[in-house]
Amino acid sequence: MSPVHSYKNQGADPHPHVGQFLRGKLRELHVSSAEAARRIGVKESTVHAYYSRPSLQFGILWKLSMGLNYDLLSDLIGSYPPNFPVKTDPRIAELENEVEILRGVLRR
């Protein structure tokens, strides 16, 4: 009997297929599967296996981000449902406030 994995139950807010996301991101970055594998120290067949997996361990995503010098995790955060509360850097709010002040000054 195979174990039941409740995280695979998509429910109301399905998570993105991380393997498909990874394949698309590597294409976008013009990085081949072989090159990605070399950068993280695995076989090319391992990277190909990632493509079919709906989820990947955090450690794999971390290692890929470091090897590609690209923030895959932030791109995945962009897949949250609309209006999902995402933690932001407080400096962004300060900068947005400064921009509004400067716009006001320029309108005068």
Image (cartoon, rainbow, N blue to C red):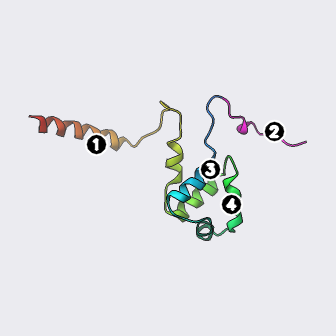
Real-space Cα separation, disc 2 to disc 1, in angstroms: 47 Å
Amino acid at pointer 2: Val
Mark on residue 48?
A: 4
Real-space Cα separation, disc 1 to disc 3, in angstroms: 35 Å
Q: Mark 1 against mark 3, which lies toward the viewer?
A: 3
Real-space Cα separation, disc 2 to disc 3, in angstroms: 23 Å
Q: Along the line of sight, which residue is nearer the eye, 32 or 55?
A: 32
* Lower sequence index among marks 1 and 4: 4
Secondary structure beneath disc 1?
Answer: helix
Q: In this view, does 53 lie to the left or right of 38?
A: right
- Reading the image, the residue beneath label 2 is 4
Residue 16: x percent and y percent? 61, 42
Local crowd at mark 1 within 10 Å, few (<14), some, or many (≥20)?
A: few
Q: Mark 2 against mark 1, which lies toward the viewer?
A: 2
Instruction: Please report the residue visible at 58 percent of the width from the left and 66 percent of the height from the top.
Output: 32
Instruction: Please report the residue visible at 15 percent of the width from the left and 34 percent of the height from the top.
Output: 104
* Lower sequence index among marks 1 and 3: 3
Amino acid at pointer 3: Gln
* Lower sequence index among marks 2 and 1: 2
Mark on residue 95?
A: 1
Real-space Cα separation, disc 1 to disc 4, in angstroms: 42 Å
State the quadrant of the C terminus.
top left
Q: Give the range drawn in magenta.
A: 1-11
Residue 58: x percent and y percent? 62, 52
